[in-house]
Amino acid sequence: MSKVMFGDKEYALVPERLKSMREDNPRASVETEQIFNADNSITFKATIIKDLADEFSARATGSARYSETELKRPKAFEKLETVSVGRALANLGYLNDGQIATSEEMLEFEDYKEDKVDQAIEKINEAKTVDELKETYFSLGMMKYPKVVTAKDLRFMELQKASK
């Protein structure tokens, strides 16, 4: 299981922990529910049951809440659901260090990733030639981030147009 360093802690990513839990528990159930609060915030609640065929099976819940302002961030709804599932998984022991990441830690990690994407886009936009762009793009190792790929494609078109 790959891990991500955040501060002085290592965290396994939620999709990998979820996959591991499902491999261990093929009859598991994962359900999420969004609750729209009066203050325009949203709370996500995730419930995981390890084995639906066993009435005494381990069960866990996790929840996370975003304020109205936090919900304006890109992919906030999906991130909120992921945090709630991650907390439920942690309650079942599917976290590499046995600790539950707080929503603040997860938000800081998302900000950290966004900063890395922004830095990569800046480097891409500084490329002066197509060859320099290729070298920069591949050295960044961020091909899985759509914003980075889009920035590379746009810069490529700009550089081709300028060379004509």
Image: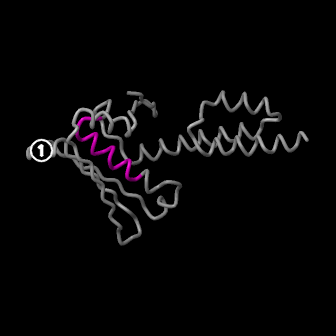
| Residue 62 vertical placement versus 138 (above, below) | below
1 vs 153, left or right, is: left
Q: Which residues are magenta?
A: 80-94
Prevailing secondary structure of the magenta residues: helix
Q: Quadrant of residue 8?
A: top left
Q: Residue 102 placed where, x, y %?
A: 36, 45
Residue sitting at x 42%, y 44%:
106
Q: Residues within 10 Å of mark 1 (few under 14, many from 20)?
A: few
Q: Quadrant of residue 142?
A: top right
Q: Nearer the viewer, residue 55 or 95?
A: 55
Q: How is the image coloured?
A: one colour
Whether the magenta-drawn stretch holds residue 21 is answered as no
| Residue 134 vertical placement versus 53 (above, below) | above
Q: Nearer the viewer, residue 127 or 7?
A: 127
The amino acid pointed to by label 1 is Ala
43 vs 131, left or right, is: left
Residue sitting at x 76%, y 42%:
155
* Residue position for label 1: 53
Q: Residue 86 placed where, x, y %?
A: 33, 43
Q: Quadrant of residue 65?
A: bottom left
Q: Residue 119 placed where, x, y %?
A: 65, 39
